Each structure stands twice: as C-alpha cells, then as structure tokens.
Amino acid sequence: MGGQYELKDGAAKKYYSIAGMMVAVKDSAGAIQYLLTDHLGSTVAVTNSSGTLTSQQRYLPFGGARTDITSPQLPITDLGYTGQRLLDAGMGGIMDYKARFYSPYLNHFTQPDIIVSNPYNPQAWNRYAYVLNNPIRYNDPTGHVCSDPEDPTPTCYGSAGQVTRVGNRMIRGNGDELGKAKNKPDKVEQGDNSCGQQGEYSSRCPGWHFYTTTNLVCPAELQCTEEEMKEYFLQFAYPGQNPAYPVTSGNSYVVGYPYTNFPMQLGWGEIIVYVNQDGLTSSNFTKPPHILYDGKVTRHAYQAENGAWYVSTYGYGNNVIHTTPVTMNRDIQWSFASINESQGKGIFNDVDKNMLAYILENH
Amino acid sequence: MFANRSKLVLMSFLLLLPLLCLAGGVALAKRYQQTYGCYDDRPPLRSFNVTIDNSQSQMLIEQLEKFANKNGFSYKISYYTPNGEDFSVWMEREDVEVVTASPFTRGEFKIGFYNNDCVDPTLASEISGLVSDLESFVGEIPSVTITEEK
C-alpha cells in the first residue's frame, strides 16, 4: 500500500493506493473519500467513509467527460479517465499519461510513441494512436505501451511479436534485435543463397530491416472524400511514380529516383504493386533486380476523426542479395539493410510529401 | 603542307564528334529501350488467385519449386515473417517471369505470369502449357482453390 501527497492552491491531499491503483484520498480537512473505478481504472464514483455516493463521473470511449451525468461531478480528484491526471483547464483538457500527454478531444497522444510497439499490427503503425484505437478494452498506464487490464500479459499484444526498447536497441519477443544480426558471420560462400530460406531468418541473415512512417496527405479543410483518396492513393503508390499514370493492381513497375517528382531518373529496380479491394491499402514487393531486394512495403490510407487523411507505410524484409556470380560479402548485405532501414522511411516520406503537394494543388 | 592536313583532319573530327556522340546516344537509348523498355507498367499475361490453409505454405513452396525445376526457371524465395507464412516466390527464365506473393491475407496468394522479353515479347497464348503445368502442381495441394483473374 502506498500513496502520494498533492499540494494544490495551498491545500494538501493524500492519496492512498493499492497495487498501483488509487483507492482513496484524504482532503485537507482530514476526511477520507473512496475512489471507485471501472475495468480500465477510470475513476467513476467517489463515496465517503459511510459509503454514500458523493460524486460521480462517466466517460466517452476516448476519455471525454459525459455531460448526461447530472449528479455532482468529481471535485475531489483530478485522477479521472483510466486513473490518469487531467491537467488544468488552461492546458486544453489534456491528460498526463506520464511518458506522454493525451488529448481526449483529439483521441490521440500529442507526442508520438518512441517506437512502433508491434510492427505486425497495423493499428500500431500510427505512433500517435491511443491504445490501438480500442479504448473500451485497453488502457495505457505509462504512456509507453497499451495494456489489457483483463490480461496478465504486460501488453495488449501478448508476448509474441512484442518489441521493447532496451537502451538504444529494439528487441523482439524472440530475442532478435531489429535491424541487426545477432551473430554476424564473416562471409557468405560463393553461391550460398540460403540466407532468407525458412529457418534461416533474421538471427542468421544480416539483412533484416523494418521501418514505418505516417504522414498527412490531405488536410481536413480540403474535405477529401474516400473516392477521391482512392484515386490519389493509386497515383502515389511507389517512389518516382508519375501521378499521371495511376497503378494497376498486379502490374510490375520500374521504381524511379524518389527524391524528385521526375520519375525514372535512376532505375532502382522493379516492384510489383497490389491494391486491396478497399482501394486504400497496397503492397509493393521488390523483385531481385531491385537494389533493396527483398522487401515488402504495405501502405494504408485512413481518415482521422477530424476529416484529414493520412497514409501509413510499413516496410520490412531481409535484404538478401542472391546475385551470382558476384560473391556478396555479409557486410555489404548488412549495409544494404541499414540503407533500407535508414532511407526507406525518408523515401516514403517524400512520396507522401509529393502526394500532399499534388492534392493541395489539384484538389 | 603536313600541318594543313593535320588541321583538316582535326577539324573534320571535331565537326563529326557531335554527330558520332548523337549516333552513339541514339544507339544506347535504342538498346536500353529494347532491353528494359517493356518493364515499366507491365501487366501480367495471366494471373491467378490461390487460396490454401496456412499450414500448407511449405507444400506450396515445394510445388512451386518443382514447377520451376521442371520448366527451367531460376527460383528465389523471400520470407517476410519469422514463421515463414508470409513469403513471395520469384521465378524467371528468358521469356517469362512468374511471381507468387501474398499481399494482404495470409493463405491467399496471387500468382502472375509476366512477359520477360522486350525484344520478342511473349504472348499470353504462348504460355498455356506453363499455366496448366503450374495449375497441376499447385492443384496437388489438398483443398487448394485456384481461380483465374480476368
């Protein structure tokens, strides 16, 4: 059992907590009141020492205060939604989630997460998103990673696929370090293309890479419709694409130099682009002539609650160079992965930047 | 006399140099066009949707490899997840390229046959034998479904 003191406007309060959850508060007059919570840890009611309800509050899914509760709202504590502290009104209604601030008005954190906690879950790609956009089930006690209060595993992803930050490294649940080989061998024998084969995954292969990025492509004030976004999405599916030629699902394309609007300046290789039936998700696969083979890039366009459109890009792969007869040194393969990991995000940031510029000009 | 002749040769060379460069550039561009010109925005000659159970991934890989070996394709596989369920297979020979990938849903694959010869393009009608062969290899996987995209 623990607790903390709070001094506000000259009045002291003492909080009492059990197992990390605030359960009672003693005000400056010495009266103890008990905090009752829901399944997420949100303070929903306060009773006095005789059990009489003295105040209550209910919340909208993302933490906004419901106004249909007519009885006195919570005056005794500012620990409200999911047990986190609501800052003063002058702070715009944001909440202190310890590592980050959260806005129940925006339904997003106001700072991005330091990593994508689980790259296998597209909901985690948006680093501003709150608890995988599933606030009925999950909460985020630390501001670092969402958690399921009903599940004993430490995060809402379970232990598999979870990525944690250790110092400046990112470690998967299976112990692999993202972007690095665990044991980097010296050389690949002539003609050895086993790297990338099943069972010879990232622990042996030096080329594993991943990156993710999310960018605004249509500001809310432009009021882009879903149908319009589907058209734009096909015009900016891969680096160097000429927007005059939208992609067709299943076709093979030569990727151009990504940092300008002028396509085909420098052939980086070929990709195949597939577009999902929803028209807002695509997957690009590099083919062996591509300098960054092998890699898969998935892009997804989505609309935020304020009407703005964003595109999230997630790239990953093993960067295995199978080219023979040239003997590829593992250091070279590894450096390709590093290039991919360090440049991939920037390349697609530029694609999105071009998309935004195009929409601003043509919408 | 000798100096004049040298001057003449030099002048002629300087006059012809831009023309030679132009001719060389045109030849290179033509060669590039012949070699790579057909590669951009290349639709599949024929394409198929293949659905298997996730547990049958390895079987699909084996069947594709058998197809590649029988028909003289080079064969490369890329894995995108540690469990090997998400992968793509690239098979190539001089006239045709075959790509198998699972872009969105595990167990759902797209197999596309692409022309791989810019000089003498392969036609869809010329790959019926290859297509039937692939269908019969992949068709050996229990409960697989194969549908052609039109």
Image (tube, grey):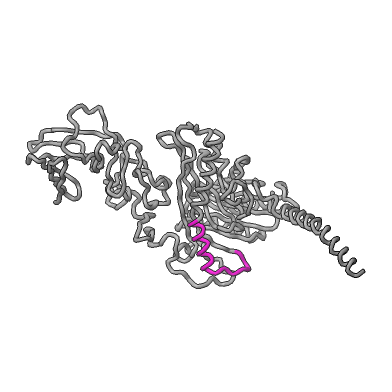
Q: Is residue A193 left or right of A82 when viewed as pictured?
A: right
Pick the residue in front: A199 or B69.
Answer: A199
Q: Residue at x 45, y 50 (%)?
A: A212
Residue stretch in magenta: A323-342
Looking at the picture, how far across and down is residue A85, in whole percent?
A: 24, 42
Looking at the picture, how far across and down is residue A4, in whole percent?
A: 15, 49
Pick the residue in front: A12 or A223.
Answer: A12
Q: Is residue A81 visible?
A: yes
Asked if the stretch drawn in magenta spans residue A340, the answer is yes
Looking at the picture, how far across and down is residue A314, in whole percent?
A: 47, 50
Majority SS type along the magenta span:
helix
How many numbered circles does the render carry?
0
Pick the residue in front: A200 or A54.
Answer: A54
Looking at the picture, how far across and down is residue A258, in whole percent?
A: 57, 50
Asked if the stretch drawn in magenta spans residue A184, the answer is no
Q: Residue at x 20, y 49 (%)?
A: A20
Q: Is residue B143 visible?
A: no
Q: Residue at x 21, y 36 (%)?
A: A44
Q: Quadrant of residue A358?
A: top right
Q: Is residue A135 left or right of A24 when viewed as pictured?
A: right
Q: Is residue B24 left or right of A190 when viewed as pictured?
A: right
Vertical relation: A187 (above or below) A42: below
Farthest residue, direction right: B1
Q: Residue at x 40, y 51 (%)?
A: A116
For the C terminus of chain A, give its image quadrant: top right
